[in-house]
Image (tube, rainbow, N blue to C red):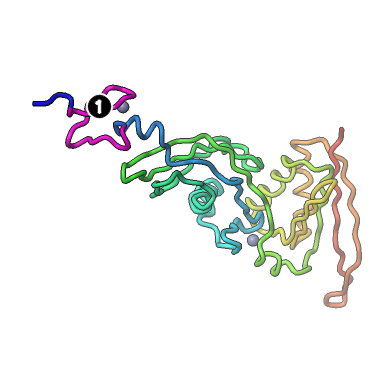
């Protein structure tokens, strides 16, 4: 027997065996430590339509996976992320999954995730976890743009820009499920929401007032006649007090 023939891992000293041959001169675990699947990544951005929750992938809009925002977001991340990851030579990804860390801040632009990558590198299985930050961009999808055209009965103007007030109004509307937001505009000084129905305006205002201190201005503009009667559009300006 020639003992010198036994190769070992120079990093941890582990001897090579038939079932565990050295990989590029190292044992498996040292090799994986030195050769993570993930080498780097491009901007981790997901683009989601705030109106229908569909998402942009390879320049096309795709329908949402789930009506549950968090499940939807997780699935979108798994779908969109792989193409943004740069892999080490010899590596392949089998699956990508994400745990969302700040899920209670649903409207947050930056989302902290724990990303789990499983794949192989030189045919060795590897699972890696990374804490990453994803940017969520909100953009109205083509379908929603078309649907909304120019129809609205009421407009809510939120001033100044405040994501919490915006979220409150949108949550309220999606709970009530009667009035739809046909268009959402992000302005320099706030948000404009276009609604299919003006009946909910006063309820929305009282809902916001429960949580925020605001000044309200209501105005009406005539925009046509229906069944011999004047039809008005309502604009509600909600301004947060300093
Ligand atoms: Zn080793
Ligand atoms: Zn949409």
Residue at 82%, 51% in the rendered image? 187
| Residue 175, percent from left and from top | 63, 50
Q: Nearer the viewer, residue 54 or 174?
A: 54
Residue at 83%, 75% in the rendered image? 226
Farthest left residue? 1
- Cβ at disc 1 under 8 Å from ligand 1: no
Quadrant of the rendering where the N terminus is positioned: top left
| Residue 126, percent from left and from top | 36, 39
Q: What kind of element bears circle 1?
A: loop
Q: Is residue 20 left or right of residue 49?
A: left
| Residue 153, percent from left and from top | 80, 63
Q: Is residue 54 left or right of residue 190?
A: left
For the record, the magenta segment spans: 5-25
| Residue 82, percent from left and from top | 49, 50
Q: Is residue 101 left or right of residue 117?
A: right
Q: Nearer the viewer, residue 64 or 175?
A: 64
Quarter, ligand 2? bottom right
Question: What is the number of callouts on the image?
Answer: 1
Q: Residues within 10 Å of mark 1 (few under 14, many from 20)?
A: some
Q: Height in image: 239 above or below 174? A: above
Q: Is residue 114 left or right of residue 102?
A: left
Q: Height in image: 174 above or below 153? A: above
Residue at 80%, 53% in the rendered image? 192
Quadrant of the rendering where the C terminus is positioned: top right
Quadrant hosting residue 163: top right
Quadrant hosting residue 119: top left
User: Circle 1 sits on which residue?
Assistant: 8
Q: Nearer the viewer, residue 51 or 217?
A: 51
Residue at 35%, 45% in the rendered image? 120
Farthest top residue? 13
Q: Is residue 146 magenta?
A: no
Magenta: main secondary structure equals loop
């Amino acid at each position: 027997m020639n003992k010198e023939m036994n190769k070992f891992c120079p990093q941890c000293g582990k001897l090579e065996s038939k079932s565990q041959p050295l990989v590029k001169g190292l044992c498996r675990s040292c090799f994986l430590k030195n050769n993570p699947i993930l080498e780097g990544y491009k901007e981790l951005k997901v683009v989601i339509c705030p109106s229908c929750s569909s998402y942009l992938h390879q320049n096309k809009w795709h329908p949402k996976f789930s009506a549950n925002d968090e499940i939807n977001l997780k699935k979108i991340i798994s779908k969109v992320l792989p193409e943004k990851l740069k892999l080490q030579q010899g590596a392949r990804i089998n699956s990508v999954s994400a745990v969302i860390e700040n899920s209670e801040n649903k409207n947050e632009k930056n989302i902290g995730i724990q990303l789990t990558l499983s794949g192989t590198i030189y045919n060795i299985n590897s699972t890696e976890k990374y804490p990453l930050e994803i940017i969520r961009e909100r953009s109205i999808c083509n379908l929603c743009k078309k649907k909304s055209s120019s129809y609205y009965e009421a407009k809510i103007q939120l001033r100044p820009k405040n994501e919490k007030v915006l979220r409150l109004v949108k949550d309220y509307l999606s709970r009530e499920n009667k009035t739809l937001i046909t268009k959402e505009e992000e302005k320099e000084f706030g948000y404009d929401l276009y609604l299919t129905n003006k009946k909910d305006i006063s309820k929305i205002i009282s809902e916001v007032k429960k949580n925020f201190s605001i000044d309200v201005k209501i105005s009406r503009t005539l925009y046509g006649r229906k069944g011999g009667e004047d039809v008005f559009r309502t604009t509600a300006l909600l301004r947060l007090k300093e």
